[in-house]
Image (tube, coloured by chain):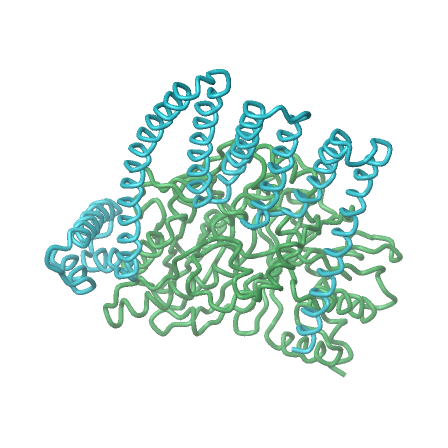
Amino acid sequence: MDRFIDFINASLPDADGDAVLFKFKKKTYDEMLLRRDEAAGRGICNQKVIDDLIVSEYPDLRAEYAVFRNKEAQKNRDKRNAKLNALGSAIYILALILFYLLISFLTGSWGTTWAIIVDGILLWVDYLLLLGVIRVTKMKKIFHIFARMMLAGLTIIFSVAVYIFVVALTDLPRSWVIVMFGLILMFVCDAAYALIARHRLAIFTCLTYVPVIAVFAFVIVGALGLLPWGVAWMIIPLSLVIDLIVIFISIAKNAISKAEVTEEWNEN
Amino acid sequence: MERKLNAELWDKMHYLFRDFNDRMVHVRLDYDFEIDAEALKTVLFCFVEKAPVLHSSFYDNKFHPYWRVENYHINDIFTVKDVSEETLEAEVDAFLLQSLPPESKVQMKAALFLHAGKSTFCLIENHMCMDGGDLKYFLKALCGNYTAFLETGASPVGLRTGSRSYEAVYGDFTATERKIAKGLYKNINTKDGHGFPLTPDTIADRPFMAKRKISAQKFDLLRAAGKERGATINDMLLTAYFYSLYELAMFPPEEGISVSCAVDLRRHIKDRNAQGVTNQTAWMQTRVPRKGRDIFETLDYVVQSSNAFKRDRFMGLHGLPLLSLGYKILPHAASEEIIKLGYANPLIAMSNIGILESEKLALSGYEPTDGFISGAVKYKPYALLSVTSLRKELTLSMCCRGNEQDKDIVNRFFDLLEQAVDRLLENAEK
């Protein structure tokens, strides 16, 4: 047993009062003992070989400790943030209700102040979704689909909140276009996420979204009377032209890069 | 606690090949002294512990397959047997031609046959765990650690460990190169109906291994003759393969045929120290447009075809992103079906595993007197010619599941191949 303790202490000298270091060393030692029991059942009697084998499985204990320490710190941060968020949410909801009641009693406009409570809750949901997006983004790419779904929800909820605010406080005609803008924002955010997170084939996501966004843009432009409907439809074929230009530029860029790499390769 | 390992892309691909071969890679090394069985057992134990995939069972989970690390006893992996010279070959064949199911708790088996003061070391392993390239490294490390263990008492723990991911091939590329390589979405498999002329499949077929040797003297001549024509040893052997196939299968001389050659993707990895044992092999499809008026014209076609591959910075990497995408975006069961639709397993293939360095395979100073590595037992109509060399002596081997007639066909093929090699040497000898 001393072999393992010597190895652990030599790699990581004790530091007074360092609880994380102690936790790591204890964990490592327990793991090593478990491995020793496991290896003992394999039919090999040479204890020195078994111990050396187990020690060799920890080629850089300091680096492993650094990772462990970071994880522990992150875990503590997450715990603290979760507590703060829970407390902050409770205070926020309470403050929102008080604000709603205060404004409603002061103005007596109960017919419009409902928007405060609805929008306040929607924005709180958006904040929670944003936390979810950040958390999932830190995970493996395979889980990013959930981040993208949350991001889509976030943008839609935000646009609905703005729409409710506008409907409650103004008589703007065709205010529903705000939701249409929200849908455009949803596609733009999703494409941006795919590009920033370097998702595989993100360019195809962008190419697909351009005509979809164009359809929404057509409806908005037509509905707001910015262009006559008979002209506004041109936005849709124009989006396809944009797609073609993007495809052409990508192919040309790839071909140039490939030619450069090939040339360099052949020179070498 | 249950321990799981990720099933890497090539693990899954080789699992997909279960309909084409038995996935076993075979090794035989002969030594002129009696190997210390206990020491070898200890080294094997350490190596299997260092590469846990070798004592894991494959779980064909329909969504996400994985390896589950299993408990085992070293006797499940290593056996020692005293045999007579008369029974040695039968014992070796019986050992080498067994197959380990991917669901079994160990993916490697080794046997030591002791006979009249000599030793024959045999090993089989699941190709899903590692390819010929890493198996050669594994054997060299095994021998080196065995010697050091006996001579200095150093514990045999010198086996590389680390990631088994196929993505290591991109690690040493520049950002631009990586971007291009990861964008090579191309199905590299082109179907060619020309196959090895074996008999139709029957349920009575049994695995067999046929071998032929080409002497060190011929090896030197072959290399010199190739050099004159800008051809490598691989090109020369491939030419002999093509030429003998035309004659054996009686393909019309005006028809083009393809032979897929295994390409070691480790050429793209500069530092392999952080890599665990794994598969890093792809195929390059060498094609000749016609037989050629003589074997030298065939050689010219082969050189042209293989040089076209060698000029490619991303040799062997075409198709990897497509495979990876196929496995990533769909559940495993669905991705297998989709990949099967686009993947055409080559009917005729060659794997030049390369040089077995005798000095690095020495045990306690004794170099192997003979040895080879051979690929999986292919199911008809597929055929794979494996090539290794030890002290410049080439061993050509072919493992098939067939009958006596197939054995004769393969031996006739080796006769023709030898004749083709001789033709290639005609001018050189003059």
In the rendered view, would you say B328 is above or below A25?
A: above
Q: Residue at x 15, y 63 (%)?
A: A13
Residue A142 visible in the picture:
yes
* Residue furthest front in the image: A107
Colour of chain B in the image: green
Where residue B356 sits: x, y (%)? 50, 68
Q: Give the side of residue B13 with respect to residue A46, left or right.
A: right
Answer whether residue B236 is visible to the viewer in this image.
Answer: no
Colour seen for chain A: cyan
Residue B354 in the image: state x and y as whole percent. Answer: 57, 66
- Residue A171 is situated, as x and y percent measured from the top left of the image, at 62, 23
Name which quarter of the figure residue B361 lies in: bottom left
Q: Nearer the viewer, residue A105 or B170?
A: A105
In the displayed structure, A221 sits above or below B113; it is above
Q: State which quadrant residue B154 falls in.
A: bottom left
User: Along the horizontal axis of the image, is A99 left or right of A13?
Assistant: right
Q: Is residue B9 depicted above or below A116 in this figure?
A: below
* Residue B252 at x, y percent in the picture: 87, 53
Which of the 4 image quadrants contains residue B169?
bottom right
